[in-house]
Image (spheres, helix red, strand yellow):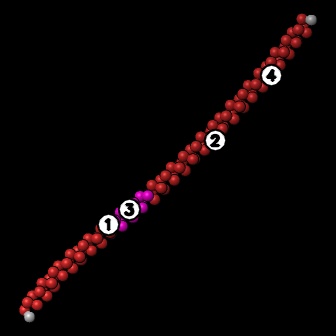
């Protein structure tokens, strides 16, 4: 009977070992899957971050171009306003000269 007990214990130990090996294998598989999932998530995050950075850079360039265009339009408007002021001043001077001329010509009549 001692032999049967030893064989039974041996079978039990063998079963326990197989269970442990299966459990270890399952745990390793779970760990591998989690590592794969983390790696995939990191790649997705990096890709998303890269795409957002590119979009941000495009927006910055777009807005910089718009600011430059507005600055150019402002400078053009300043030139036009300055030129209009010059013409207005010139017209006022000519009006004064013409008025003086009319006054002088009426006096001489």
> Tag 4 or tag 2, which sits nearer the N-term?
4
State the residue at coordinates (86%, 9%): 6
Which one is nearer the viewer's eye here, 89 or 52? 89
Q: Pointer 2: what residue? A: 40
Cα gap from disc 3 to disc 2, whole angstroms? 42 Å
Closest to the camera, between mark 1 and mark 3, is 1
Q: Pointer 1: what residue? A: 75
> Tag 2 or tag 3, which sits nearer the N-term?
2
Cα gap from disc 2 to disc 4, whole angstroms? 32 Å
Q: Pointer 3: what residue? A: 68
**Circle 3: is it few (<14), some (14-19), or many (20+) Cα within 10 Å?**
few
Q: Pointer 4: what residue? A: 18
Corner quadrant of residue 77 = bottom left
> Tag 3 or tag 1, which sits nearer the N-term?
3
Closest to the camera, between mark 2 and mark 4, is 2
| Discs 2, 1 touching: Cβ within 8 Å | no
Return the residue found at the far top. 2
Considering the whole magenta stretch, tell me its main secondary structure: helix
> Tag 4 or tag 1, which sits nearer the N-term?
4
Left or right: 46, with 14 as reference point: left
Cα gap from disc 1 to disc 3, whole angstroms? 11 Å
Q: Provide the secondary structure element on which disc 4 rests.
A: helix
Residue 39 spot, x, y in % from top left: 62, 39
Residue 49 spot, x, y in % from top left: 54, 46
Return the residue found at the far right. 1
Residue 3 spot, x, y in % from top left: 90, 8
């Amino acid at each position: 009977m001692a032999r049967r007990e030893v064989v039974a214990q041996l079978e039990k130990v063998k079963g326990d070992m197989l269970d442990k090996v299966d459990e270890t294998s399952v745990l390793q598989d779970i760990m591998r899957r989690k590592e794969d999932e983390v790696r995939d998530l990191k790649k997705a995050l990096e890709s998303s971050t890269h795409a957002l950075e590119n979009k941000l850079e495009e927006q910055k360039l777009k807005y910089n171009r718009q600011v430059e265009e507005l600055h150019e339009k402002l400078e053009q408007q300043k030139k036009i306003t300055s030129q209009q002021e010059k013409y207005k001043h010139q017209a006022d001077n000519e009006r004064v000269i013409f008025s003086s001329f009319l006054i002088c010509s009426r006096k001489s009549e």
